[in-house]
Image: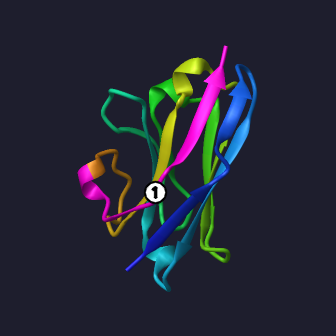
Amino acid sequence: QVQLVESGGGLVQAGGSLRLSCAASGRTFSSYTMGWFRQAPGKEREFVAAISWSGGTTVNTNSVKGRFTISRDNAKNTIYLQMNSLQPEDTAVYYCAAGAIGRLVTSTKSYDYWGQGTQVTVSS
């Protein structure tokens, strides 16, 4: 069992930055693939980024490449999402997720555990 708690969301102007954190409980955290997803009002939850259990491999969705960076610190049971050059279209609730997948995947169905989400609002 893994419990996830996100933090770091807030209101920021376009062009600004935020860093999201996701703290995980559970002794097997380091064995999970971790991901960030987001959901805007009226839209489906979409993939943002994922990172392998070791942190050695990452993947981002095209719309955030060059702006967002996912990372993890297994010693702290925490993953991060550094978001730079934020745009109004990045406004959403951001969720972290954990999956005993063994590879990087973008589908919500592949992840077993989810946090409660943190709101990110980017004003123009």
In this rendering, the answer to whether 72 lies above or below 30 is: above
In this rendering, the answer to whether 110 lies above or below 39 is: below
Horizontal side of 58 relative to 121 (left or right) equals left
x then y, percent, for residue 110:
26, 56
On whether residue 94 falls in the magenta region, the answer is: no
Q: Quadrant of residue 18?
A: top right
Towards the viewer: 122 or 25: 122
Q: Which residue is under mark 1?
A: 116
| Circle 1 crowding by C-alpha within 10 Å: few under 14, some 14–19, many from 20 | some
Q: Amino acid at mark 1?
A: Gln
Horizontal side of 95 relative to 119 (left or right) equals left
Q: Which residues are magenta?
A: 109-124
In this rendering, the answer to whether 116 lies above or below 12 is: below
x then y, percent, for residue 55:
57, 61
Horizontal side of 62 relative to 9 (left or right) equals left
Towards the viewer: 26 or 31: 26
